[in-house]
Amino acid sequence: MIQITREGRYELIETKKNIKILKLDDSQVFAWPETKAYGEMLVTSHNPHRADAILSSGRYKLYKVKEESSLTDLEHLELETGENQWQGYLLLTGLPTDKKIRSRIIPTKQVITNKHRVASL
């Protein structure tokens, strides 16, 4: 089963200090560092960030996947990278929150948008 749990607009920027920042709907902001020990992470951020460069922007979709043979049973975040082109990411523990401020994010070739039947919440 694939359920879409959220969708909206995103912006991925980079600061002067080469830190990537992901903004979802202008309401949630995450730093996106890469660590040697854990790989790429999303970290909840409440600080204002000034963009030195806009890396990408567009639509995003967040899915819950369970018992699908061709997909990993996790939350999937997809970012639009062009017209009908999407980059998929696996969120090992979901999006970060104020209580659980970090979450691993892993790029994947698994893409749901425009390829699978999806149930809405």
Image: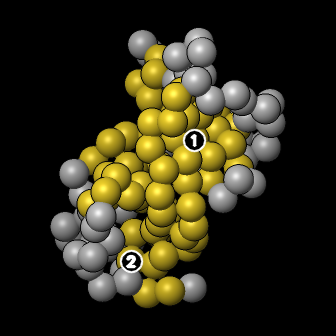
| Local crowd size for mark 2, using a 10 Å CA cut-off: few (<14), some (14–19), many (≥20) | many
Query: What residue is rendered at 38% in x and 71% in y?
Result: 66
Q: Can you say whether 27 is above or below 103 in the image?
A: below
Q: Position of residue 98 (x, y in %)?
A: 79, 43
> Is label 1 or label 2 in front?
1
The circle on residue 22 is: 1
Q: Which quadrant of the rendered structure holds the N terminus? A: bottom left
Q: Which quadrant of the rendered structure holds the C terminus? A: bottom right
Residue 66 shown left or right of residue 22 in the figure: left
| Local crowd size for mark 1, using a 10 Å CA cut-off: few (<14), some (14–19), many (≥20) | many
Query: What residue is rendered at 47% in x and 57% in y?
Result: 58
In this view of the protein, can residue 74 be seen by the observer?
Answer: no
Q: Picture quarter containing residue 107?
A: top left
How many discs mark residues in the rendered view? 2
The circle on residue 2 is: 2
For the residue marked with disc 1, what is the amino acid? Leu
Q: Can you say whether 52 is above or below 98 in the image?
A: above
SS for dot 2: strand
Query: What residue is rendered at 73% in x and 34% in y?
Result: 45
Is tag 1's residue or tag 2's residue first in the polypeptide sequence? 2
Q: Give the alpha-carbon distance from disc 1 to disc 2, as whole Å.
A: 24 Å
Q: Can you say whether 35 is above or below 99 in the image?
A: above
SS for dot 1: strand
